[in-house]
Image: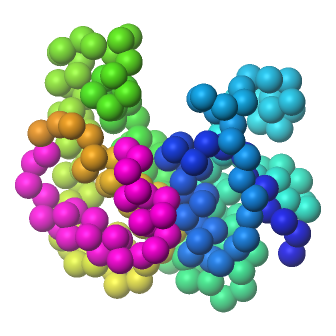
Amino acid sequence: MGTLKILGRASSINVRKVLWTCEELGLPYEREDWGNGFRSTHSPEFLQLNPNAQVPVLIDDAGVLWESNSICRYLTSKVPGQALLPDAPRARALVEQWMDWQATELNPSWGYAFHALVRRNPDYQDPQRIAAGVRAWNDKMALLEQQLAQTGAYVLGDRFTLADIVLGLSVHRWAAAPLEHPHYPAVAAYYERLSQRPGFLLHGRNGEP
């Protein structure tokens, strides 16, 4: 297996998905800082790798890959017998369903509120939009609360999967944000359960929102 190279700043939530996945799978990698505060993703060099100018980018012997969830899925294929992404079609689809929900439903819900309250971006300071963003974020987290209350452990039951990596980072971002958090006991228990995993402490609950 050739060396994996991951391009992207370690503070990016999408880069952290990939880093945590590597930790869980025991895959060695090299990482280069790209993105805000580092080398520009709009440089010709980077755009040749990812025309979307986004991190992360993965480079290995097979070539270049972008989109964090796709990278995480691909990494599981490098480790025979891994348990993060099942081979059985329905079990795999359920993991991917929650991964896609994180990317298409949960992530967009926090956009305005996160930039306003955490990044303190001056372009995101409309009080009404902040309040609406907080409500939307908490509403999506309520759906996760319902799921975790049913499973009692991880997103899909007793077994930790790739869905827990992408959702665990989102839970950390929500918990770390300076906003009013509803009482979600299943989410709180999940957060502490994830905190028993070294990869989450290294790339998730590590002081970065």
Residue 127 visible? The answer is yes
The C terminus sits in image quarter: top left
Residue at the outermost left position? 183
Report the coloring of the rendering. rainbow
Q: Position of residue 161 (x, y in %)?
A: 48, 74
Q: Residue at x 25, y 50 (%)?
A: 175
Residue displayed at 66% across by 88% down: 81
Count of numbered marks? 0
The answer to whether residue 147 is visible is no
Q: Which residues are magenta?
A: 181-209
In the rendered image, residue 46 lying in the magenta stretch gets the answer no
Q: Position of residue 46 (x, y in %)?
A: 80, 32
The quadrant the N terminus occupies is: bottom right
Q: Position of residue 91 (x, y in %)?
A: 50, 77
Residue 44 x, y percent position in the rendering: 85, 24
Residue 119 or residue 99, whichever sits in front: 119
Q: Residue at x 49, y 70 (%)?
A: 199
> On the picture, is 177 further left or further right than 34?
left
Residue reaching furthest to the bottom: 81
In this rendering, would 71 be left or right of 142?
Answer: right
Residue sitting at x 59%, y 29%: 36
